[in-house]
Image (tube, rainbow, N blue to C red):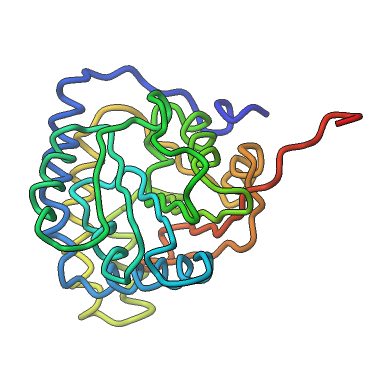
Amino acid sequence: MELADAMGERVSTQPAVERLIAVGYGLTYDAIVRGFAPYQALLDEIAALVASGGAPGPPVATRVLDVSCGIGTVAERLARRGWSVVGLDSVGHLVSVARRTHRDSGLSLSFQHVDVARDPLPEAGTYDVVVSMHTLYWHPDPAGFLTACRRALKPGGHAVFLTYDRPARVLRTFAEVRARRGTWEACRALRWLLPTAAFELFRGGRPRYLSCTEFTGALKAAGFEVLETRRTFLAGISLLAWTRATEPARLPGA
């Protein structure tokens, strides 16, 4: 089954409305997750994987690409570990905010306005690690997106992908968090659940919630070796895959 069939067809939307909602959510997301312990734990999880895929030598030698970086929250967190980080986003206004917010950070951190599935990829083939947080499930060209992420990496480079395998249903997720961590933690989870559920309700298009089999199949088709998969974030609402770029197949006689 082709990737497009596995992920479903995208429903046509009003681009201007879609853009407005994306900008609004992108601008408020930092406030939503700042100090939110489950999200901070997720960032620590990602940073540990980036460290394991880093280049030899000083941290600044490791080049990290954060795809769909929004206003740069994750990119800035990774750059504070000493890595050289580039953030890309298809929404120009979010890139402008990221540049303005982090321009005086003193970090090896930059931002570019790029849709990786459509535009030329800056410095393709030079990155040690690609980070993609919850982009695959909504991107209009998932196959093109994954191919671009593969193209960004050095030979043998690594990528960490996260995607949701189900909607952020408030009542269901609240109940799951309460069963695992108690009522207080479930109430705290509403800080992320309520705005995220509202965002999913009002944005256009139909998200593609992949099973673990579909997720790993899409990654393999794009040229990634899947090294590990796990559930993470809140009550395991997110699927994480740690991958490595595979070598292109050689033609006979090459």
Q: How far from the left and from the top, in percent, is residue 116?
A: 40, 32
Q: Is residue 36 above or below residue 3?
A: below
Q: State the residue in front, 35 or 59.
A: 59
Quarter of the image holding residue 84? bottom left
Residue at the spot x=66%, y=52% of the render? 225
Residue at the spot x=37%, y=65% of the render? 60
Quarter of the image holding residue 254? top right
Residue lying at the far right of the rendered structure: 253
Q: Determine whether, in the image, residue 211 is placed left or right of residue 71.
A: right
Q: State the residue in front, 198 or 131.
A: 131
Q: Determine whether, in the image, residue 119 is placed left or right of residue 185.
A: right
Q: Is residue 43 above or below residue 3?
A: below
Residue at the spot x=23%, y=68% of the render? 189
Q: How far from the left and from the top, in percent, is residue 133?
A: 37, 52
Quarter of the image holding residue 244? bottom right
Q: Determine whether, in the image, residue 225 is placed left or right of residue 152.
A: right
Q: State the residue in front, 84 or 6.
A: 84
Q: Is residue 21 above or below residue 182?
A: above
Q: Quadrant of the N terminus?
A: top right
Q: State the residue in front, 242 or 203.
A: 242
Q: Determine whether, in the image, residue 106 is placed left or right of residue 169.
A: left
Q: How far from the left and from the top, in percent, is residue 169?
A: 31, 53
